[in-house]
Each structure stands twice: as structure tokens, then as C-alpha cells.
């Protein structure tokens, strides 16, 4: 133990005036830390020193756990925070960060302590309100354990279909050395995706991507000798369809992920750039923006077909930006789409589909049965008296496919206006689900259209309802 302490004193550059007895006592009893002068014990000038000390402390932790680890990691973060580049903080804010660290350090995992910005980000997200910051951090600790985030980089292997067809891309580092993501959101084959995976598979893969980005930022900080911890996201909404915008699973996973992101990755977002935004995106955004904090909303900028290339070049060097986004970078063969390092959305082969899908609504006590004769159609009517009401549906066919439409009319005297249509829906692999926010008072009609089929009638099992408020539900 004494040789270990001598090594510790040498590595951490304990001042000659410090008493080895006091150092030993504090090492064995972390509460004596309050009697020690942190500036006297530590002299850390750069990131390399911190990293070297941290690696040594991890080794100490593996050999001597419990109280020794608590003391050492507490001192480590005192050193790390001393070198962090948060220049605009007041002394009061620094004291709040220090107090949050002191209150929670015994519950923080070694993996979490690798993040030098941990305590700062949670304090900043709650405007340096200590009580709220502590509540947020403690909830994060519980959530982190539940989703096994500490080991996700080493232990979790995503499904092949998710890795190949869910386009979450690291693009580059911007002019300020912050990480830039690119997501080809509009081209994702959402129906193929939901036929191939469960929502939890998508959620875990997104968490894996976020942790990879955090690791990239940490390595970037080491390389450039400057602390960087934020990222920018570019979402390309070209060809984003009405069907995708109103698909219930898309809405549910979007709400769930955004809630989880806000609560557990505070102050990571530098900016979000949405390009090629269309009316279908506006429908989805109407749902998700209600749960976004005002601070995050101010970081979102949306562009239609024009104006965004100039915006990207303001913060990304042209030589780092792919040509299809307005930069100079191409593949070695000159391909402007940069397929060698960018995954674009594309059709998912049916070989990935979950063909052993078991029907859920067939025989369910709360599901209704509907027979649509050949060359005919059937409608289900809902009278909406509150703007913002939610029309929700799910259905399955016993076999084959059906066209699905939604109509609206203000009263019985008017002809209905088609709001949207989905052709040839096949529920062989999953239940078809949807959600629509009613912006007008009137009559909404769900239509199952079989007029294209001259031979086969269609047997449908469905549930549909009208709700005034949308409430989160458990999902898996």
C-alpha cells in the first residue's frame, strides 16, 4: 500500500510541503479530503497529464476498490476541471459544479468519469440550479444502468439490417472542431425497417451511435489539446413522405428518443440543420416540438430546397463537406455522394423481414372485424369537435393487401377531401399503425379501399379511436 501511495504522490505531483501522513489518511478516508488544499495537491496543466493520471487511477481502482476509488476519482475530477476550458463561468457557477460533483461522486461509474464535461453539462442544462441539476443527474445514473450504457460500445452488437440501412453517419469535424453528423432521414425505408426490427433495436442502435460520437469527441480533444464536447446534426428530409410522417411507430420512436436525449445528453447539441424540409416533415415536427425544451428549439434551423448549402459552408470547411452537400469532397473515383463513408437511405430487401410475425388483432376482444367486398370500399367515420384531437388506428389483414385513405369534410353536405392515401398495405409482417392530428373541426373518415381487386374480398381486423390528448405509452 505504501509503495502504491508513493507512486500516487509521484504521478499526481503532490507538493513537497504536503504531509505523506495526511495523504495516506485522506486516501483511506475520503471525508478527510475537506481538510486538503486541492491547489496544493494538484498541478495539472494539460489534457495529456490528466489522461495519464486517469489511466493510473483506473489501475488503482481495479486493485483497490471502494473508498480508495471514491477519493481518487474525486481528486481526479478536481484536476480535470481545473484544465477544462469553460472560460465564461462565474465563481458561483464553479462552486455549484464542485458541489454537484461532491454530492454524486460516490454514485458515478468509472465510465461516466471519463467525460470531463459531465458535471458542467448537467448544471448548465438546469441553469446552475443545484437541486434540479442533482435530480437530473441522479435520474440519468438510474437510466444509464437500465440501458447498460457503460458497456454498450464493447458488448452490444447491432443487427446487420440496422447498421446497413439506418443512415446515421459521422461526417467530419467542423471549423471549431465540433463533431458533425449526417442523417439521410428522408430516404429511410421505414416500412421495411419496421418489418425487419423492433423499436428497441432502433433505440439501442441510436444509443450506440451517440456513444461512438462521444468517444470521437473525447479522442478529438486529446488530439488537439482543447476540450470539445458538442455536435451538429444535419437531417436531410428529401423525399420524406406523408406516410412516414403519420406512421404511429415513427412518431412513438421519435418522441421516446428525443425525450431520452434531452434528459441524458444535456448540452451536447451545438445546432441542428434540417435541409429539404417539406410539408410532411412539418406534420411530424408538430408532434415532436411539443416535448422539446426552448433551449433546444432555438438551436434548430430548417431549410427547404435552397439556402442550406451556404449555411453548411459557414461552419464546415469545403474540403471536409461532401460535394452533394455543397462542398468539395468526393470519393476517390469522383463520386459526389461519397458512398465510401456515407450510408444513404435505400430499400431494405425482404430477406431481412420477420416472416414469422404473429397476428395481434386477429381474435382480440377489443378489435372489430370488417369485410371489404371485391371492387368496393368501406369507411369508418369520426366527428371531431376539438382542434388538435388525435385520430389513432391500427389494423391487420388476414391475407393480401388493401388501400388505406383518410378523408375530411366540414359537414355532411360537403364532399370529402382526400388528406392522404397509402396504397397496397400488406400486414404480413406487422400491424399497420397510424396517428393523425386533426387541425380542423369536422368529419374524418378512414377508408379501406378494395376497388382495385376484382377477385378477392379482404378480411380486416382493426382498432380506431379519437383522443383529445396524446399520452406516452409503454412500448418495446
Image (cartoon, helix red, strand yellow):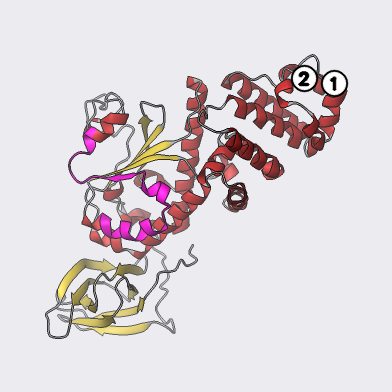
The verdict on residue 294 being magenta is yes
Q: Nearer the viewer, mark 1 or mark 2?
A: 1
Q: Residues within 10 Å of mark 2 (few under 14, many from 20)?
A: some
* First reached walking from the N terminus: tag 1 or tag 2: 2
Q: Could you say where residue 296 lies in the image, as x and y percent from the top left?
A: 40, 47
Q: Which residues are magenta?
A: 281-310
Query: Is residue 192 depicted above or below 119 in this figure?
Result: below
Residue that appears at 37% across and 57% down: 288
Q: Which residue is mark 2?
A: 9
Front in this rendered view, residue 256 or 371: 256
Query: Is residue 383 depicted above or below 142 in this figure?
Result: below
Q: Are marks 1 and 2 in contact (CB under 8 Å)?
A: yes
Q: Is residue 216 left or right of residue 302?
A: right
Q: Could you say where residue 391 lies in the image, as x and y percent from the top left?
A: 32, 73
Q: CA distance from mark 1 to mark 2?
A: 8 Å
Question: Splitting the image into 4 quarters, where does residue 170 fall?
Answer: top left
Amino acid at each position: 500500500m505504501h509503495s502504491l501511495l508513493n507512486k500516487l504522490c509521484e504521478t499526481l505531483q503532490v507538493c513537497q510541503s504536503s504531509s505523506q501522513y495526511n495523504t495516506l489518511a485522506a486516501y483511506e478516508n475520503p471525508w478527510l479530503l475537506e481538510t486538503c488544499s486541492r491547489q496544493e495537491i494538484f498541478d495539472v496543466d494539460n489534457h495529456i497529464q490528466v489522461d495519464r493520471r486517469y489511466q493510473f487511477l483506473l489501475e488503482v481502482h481495479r486493485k483497490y476498490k471502494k473508498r480508495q476509488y471514491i477519493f481518487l476519482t474525486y481528486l481526479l475530477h478536481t484536476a480535470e476541471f481545473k484544465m477544462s476550458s469553460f472560460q465564461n463561468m462565474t465563481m458561483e457557477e464553479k462552486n455549484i459544479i464542485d458541489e454537484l460533483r461532491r454530492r454524486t461522486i460516490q454514485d458515478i461509474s468509472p465510465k461516466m468519469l471519463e467525460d470531463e464535461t459531465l458535471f458542467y453539462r448537467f448544471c448548465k442544462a438546469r441553469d446552475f440550479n443545484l437541486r434540479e441539476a442533482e435530480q437530473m443527474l441522479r435520474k440519468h445514473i438510474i437510466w444509464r444502468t437500465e440501458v447498460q450504457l457503460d458497456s454498450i460500445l464493447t458488448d452490444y452488437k447491432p443487427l446487420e439490417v440496422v447498421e446497413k440501412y439506418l443512415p446515421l453517419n459521422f461526417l467530419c469535424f467542423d471549423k471549431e472542431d465540433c463533431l458533425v453528423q449526417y442523417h439521410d432521414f428522408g430516404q429511410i425505408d421505414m416500412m421495411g425497417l419496421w418489418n425487419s426490427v423492433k423499436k428497441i433495436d432502433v433505440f439501442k442502435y441510436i444509443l450506440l451511435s451517440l456513444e461512438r460520437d462521444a468517444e470521437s469527441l473525447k479522442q478529438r480533444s486529446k488530439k488537439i489539446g482543447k476540450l470539445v464536447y458538442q455536435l451538429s446534426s444535419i437531417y436531410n428530409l428529401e423525399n420524406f413522405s406523408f406516410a412516414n410522417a403519420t406512421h404511429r411507430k415513427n412518431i412513438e420512436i421519435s418522441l421516446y428518443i428525443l425525450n431520452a436525449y434531452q434528459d441524458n445528453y444535456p448540452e451536447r447539441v451545438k445546432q441542428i440543420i434540417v435541409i429539404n424540409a417539406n410539408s410532411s416533415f412539418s406534420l411530424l415536427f408538430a408532434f415532436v416540438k411539443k416535448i422539446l425544451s426552448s433551449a433546444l428549439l432555438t438551436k434548430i434551423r430548417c431549410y427547404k430546397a435552397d439556402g442550406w448549402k451556404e449555411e453548411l459552408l459557414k461552419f464546415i470547411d469545403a474540403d471536409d463537406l461532401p460535394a452533394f452537400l455543397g462542398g468539395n469532397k468526393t470519393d476517390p473515383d469522383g463520386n459526389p455522394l461519397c458512398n465510401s463513408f456515407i450510408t444513404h437511405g435505400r430499400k431494405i430487401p425482404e430477406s431481412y423481414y420477420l416472416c414469422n410475425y404473429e397476428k395481434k388483432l386477429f381474435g382480440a376482444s377489443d378489435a372489430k372485424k370488417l369485410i371489404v367486398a371485391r371492387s368496393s370500399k368501406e369507411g369508418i367515420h369520426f366527428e371531431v369537435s376539438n382542434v388538435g384531437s388525435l385520430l389513432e388506428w391500427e389494423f391487420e389483414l388476414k391475407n393480401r393487401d388493401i388501400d388505406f385513405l383518410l378523408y375530411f369534410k366540414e359537414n355532411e353536405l360537403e364532399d370529402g377531401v382526400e388528406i392522404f392515401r397509402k396504397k397496397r398495405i400488406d400486414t404480413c409482417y406487422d400491424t399497420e399503425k397510424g396517428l393523425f392530428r386533426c387541425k380542423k373541426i369536422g368529419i374524418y373518415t378512414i377508408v379501406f379501399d378494395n376497388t382495385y381487386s376484382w377477385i378477392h374480398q379482404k378480411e380486416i381486423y382493426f382498432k380506431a379511436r379519437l383522443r383529445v390528448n396524446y399520452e406516452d405509452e409503454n412500448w418495446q
